């Protein structure tokens, strides 16, 4: 029940978001029941296949910044340079199409996708199969090779450009205007991760006390929202799980269907969609993302402050 004695704009926003959150969760469960699949989890709504391991930048707000494990950097800080084989990328696309998936696919994850010379080839393959391409870039390659824009324009349906170098609002808006002008068909959006690093400080998840209340009150829907495949074939639970700490499996060893519907994956997903679910996993305890409801740090904190 809402305590109207303490009503204000913040409490109204909190209860509205909470209602939308639970409505989306109930809708997912309803669809599963209608399909006779209440014992399993819904299909993902976004696919991410990482083409390769590298990025031309080394941003302090990125999870890869402090990774010296051999996944993103070696112990000496050198960037790891590995690729997922082309045949495997196409095989993954074929598998998801066979399963009935017709949503979006991206090729970036924690790397710069347009550094890979195969992008046009795999992107064209995905489009021919009926997928929507939704990707992210820091756009540095377009600055060095403006003609490349013509090849990407319309091949990529939605492109988010990370703007990291502006010094004030004027420069920010000028850059936004510039990039929107460069693309005639691709829909352009922007990321301001340097200014709004979501829930990270120096590439590490924040662990301050303010996150506690939200952790205890909200489940997490990220694991059933996306299918995240790292360049080496390992499945991540979500975008924060770059180390693949949950051990879900590898696409070189098992099919997409077997991995997604594995007993282990289903148990983790079903645990996280319950109240207090994220408290069962060390990585999830540190994270206060709301799943597909809110992606912005300031908005998340605003909710937490009134809870």
Image (tube, rainbow, N blue to C red):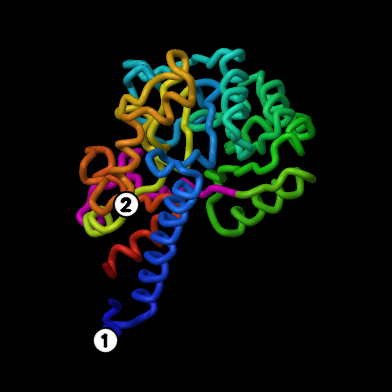
Examine the structure image and report whether residue 172 is included in the region drawn in magenta: no
Q: Which residue is mark 2?
A: 219
Q: Is residue 172 left or right of residue 130?
A: left
Residue shown at 45%/53% (left/top)?
A: 30
Answer few, some or many: residues within 10 Å of disc 2's Cα (few below 14, many 20 plus, some between 14 and 19). Answer: many
Q: Is residue 243 at all visible to an observer of this figure? A: no
Question: Where does the C terminus fall, quadrant-wise?
Answer: bottom left
Q: Which residues are magenta?
A: 190-211
Instruction: Give the residue drawn at x 69%, y 33%.
Output: 142
- Residue in the foreground of this view, choosing between 261 and 164: 261
The answer to whether any part of residue 43 appears in the image is: yes
Image position, residue 38 (x, y; %): 40, 44
- Identity of the residue drawn at 41% across and 50% down: 291
Q: Residue 46 appears in which quarter of the rendering? A: top right
Q: Is residue 207 magenta?
A: yes
Quarter residue 202 falls in: top left
Q: Is residue 37 left or right of residue 149?
A: left
Q: In terms of depth relative to the viewer, which is nearer, 89 or 187?
A: 89
Q: Position of residue 77 (x, y in %)?
A: 37, 20
For label 1, the SS is helix
Residue 86 as seen in the image, left or right of residue 149: left
Q: CA distance from mark 1 to mark 2?
A: 27 Å
- Mark 2 falls on what kind of element? loop
Q: Position of residue 243 (x, y in %)?
A: 34, 27
Residue 21 at what x, y percent from top left? Answer: 41, 59
Instruction: Single out the mark in the foreground, 1 or 2.
Output: 2
Residue wearing tag 1 = 5
Q: Earlier in the sequence, mark 1 or mark 2?
A: 1
């Amino acid at each position: 029940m809402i305590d109207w004695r303490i009503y204000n704009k913040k409490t109204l926003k909190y209860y509205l978001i909470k209602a939308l959150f639970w409505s989306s969760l109930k809708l997912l469960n309803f669809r599963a029941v209608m399909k006779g699949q209440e014992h399993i989890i819904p299909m993902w709504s976004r696919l991410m296949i990482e083409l390769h391991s590298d990025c031309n930048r080394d941003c302090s707000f990125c999870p890869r910044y402090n990774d010296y494990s051999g996944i993103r950097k070696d112990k000496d800080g050198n960037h790891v340079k590995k690729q997922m084989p082309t045949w495997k990328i196409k095989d993954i696309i074929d598998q998801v199409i066979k399963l009935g998936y017709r949503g979006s696919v991206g090729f970036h994850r924690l790397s710069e996708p347009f550094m890979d010379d195969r992008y046009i080839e795999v992107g064209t393959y995905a489009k021919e199969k009926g997928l929507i391409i939704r990707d992210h870039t820091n756009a540095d390659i377009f600055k060095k090779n403006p003609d490349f824009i013509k090849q990407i324009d319309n091949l990529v349906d939605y492109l988010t450009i990370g703007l990291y170098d502006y010094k004030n609002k004027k420069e920010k808006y000028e850059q936004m205007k510039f990039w929107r002008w460069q693309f005639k068909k691709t829909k352009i959006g922007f990321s301001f991760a340097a200014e709004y690093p979501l829930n990270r400080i120096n590439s590490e998840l924040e662990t301050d006390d303010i996150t506690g209340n939200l952790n205890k009150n909200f489940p997490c829907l990220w694991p059933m929202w996306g299918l995240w495949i790292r360049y080496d074939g390992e499945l991540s639970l979500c975008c924060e799980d770059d180390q693949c700490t949950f051990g879900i499996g590898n696409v070189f060893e098992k099919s997409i269907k077997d991995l997604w519907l594995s007993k282990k994956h289903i148990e983790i997903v079903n645990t996280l969609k319950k109240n207090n679910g994220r408290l069962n996993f060390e990585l999830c305890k540190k994270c206060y993302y709301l799943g597909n409801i809110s992606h912005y740090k300031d908005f998340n904190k605003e909710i937490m402050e009134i809870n």
